[in-house]
Amino acid sequence: MNTKPRMLKRALYFIVPLVLIAVLVVKLKNNKKVAQDKVYQYDKEQPINVQADTLQIEDLSSEINYSGTFEPNKETKLSAEIQGKINEIFVDVGSYVNKGQTVVQLDNSLLKLQVKNNEVQIEGLEADVNRYTILANADAIQGVQLEKAVLGLKSAKTQKAILLEQIDKTTIKAPFNGIVTAKLSEVGAFAASGIPLLQISDITNLKFTVNVPESELSHFKFNQSYSITTDAYSEILVSGKAIMIGSKANLGNSFPVQFAVNNTSDLKIKSGMFGKVILKNETGERGLIIPSSAIIGTASQPQVYLIKNGKSVLQNISISTRVKNKAIVSNGLKEGDVIVTIGFINLFDGANVTFK
């Protein structure tokens, strides 16, 4: 009597999982279709818009510029060697000072009083020495008393010399000719050893520093002179002698090259100004020059994209020289070729392209 319900129950055990699996499969297929519909399908036949240049034979003689910064030949921050209140500051920012000129005066009144007191002591000790000398010669006193008086006089004179040296250090003088470029304290402030009061810069002579890529470091020779111009005054052209060629690269894998430069008579070039060192490459040769931005591939096998019949063509090239953001091509290209310079995203060999 219970055979049919039991058979129906067993059938349901098999049918229900199959139905769930079928529903799951249908759901997954629908999800896949929805996902495919949402994913962008790139049309490889669609033209890619790029920028291009038509190559021409150019004169390889050119100017190469390296930007850098002018620095003072000498610069120092003056501070007091002894403590004291600042009585006078005789200069201000922009003042020109000569070597040995007094620029700051500290209070030395107490030291001068100590000197006067010391002079009184010396006077008394000199009198004692004279008196003890007469008595010692007459055997009226022991010689040790004269010796003590002589030593006391020497000590007092040494103390006076120390006080005079301290007084001298209350007068702060310029260590070299230059311009006051910073005033770091005021009258009435307390000066202490090591605390800067003024900054003096000598810009009569300047240092000019540029950073040069490893591949172009050979352009510079020690003690050789180069032309340097300033960004602020393009009409000013000065000569700079290479005084340092870096032996260690910085984080950008460039090497510092430093030049000694004589400023103009009116000191027009200021510390911190930007300028350029100019190299002239006068080979007299002609060739194909392309922008480095157009080059893809590897260092051992550089490549460019040519444009032929509306399609991009990947072309192997050989480079003879790289100069800053340009490269001189020795093989693989000819005059009249059109190369892609901008627009490499999605670009591939054989792609349809439009360009301007």
Image (cartoon, helix red, strand yellow):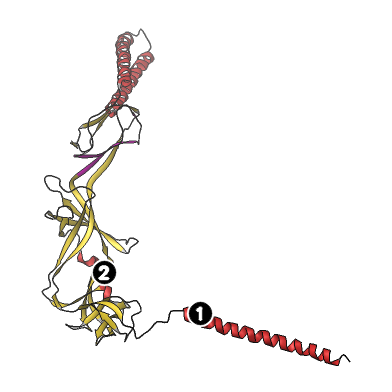
Q: Which image quadrant is residue 183 in?
A: top left
Q: Is residue 210 above or below residue 131?
A: below
Residue 66 % position (x, y): 21, 61
Residue name at image x 14 percent, y 76 percent: 58
Of the numbered discs 2 and 1, the one sitting upstream in the chain is: 1
Residue closest to the eye, 42 or 15: 15
Location of the C terminus (image quadrant): bottom left
Q: CA distance from mark 2 to mark 1?
A: 50 Å
Q: Which mark is residue 35?
A: 1
Per the rendered image, the range of residues in magenta is: 177-202
State left or right for residue 97 relative to residue 37.
left
In the image, residue 179 lies in the stretch drawn in magenta: yes
Q: Which image quadrant is residue 308 in?
A: bottom left
Residue named by callout 2: 215
Residue 74 % position (x, y): 23, 45
Q: Is residue 149 above or below residue 38?
A: above
Residue closest to the eye, 49 or 251: 49
Residue name at image x 26 percent, y 73 percent: 292
Location of the N terminus (image quadrant): bottom right
Mark 1 residue type: Ala
Residue closest to the eye, 169 or 57: 57
Residue name at image x 23 percent, y 34 percent: 92
Mark 2 element type: helix
Residue 248 % position (x, y): 32, 61
Q: Nearer the viewer, mark 2 or mark 1?
A: 1
Callout 2: few (<14), some (14-19), or many (20+) C-alpha neighbours within 10 Å?
Answer: few
Mark 2 residue type: Ser
Q: Which image quadrant is residue 109 in?
A: top left
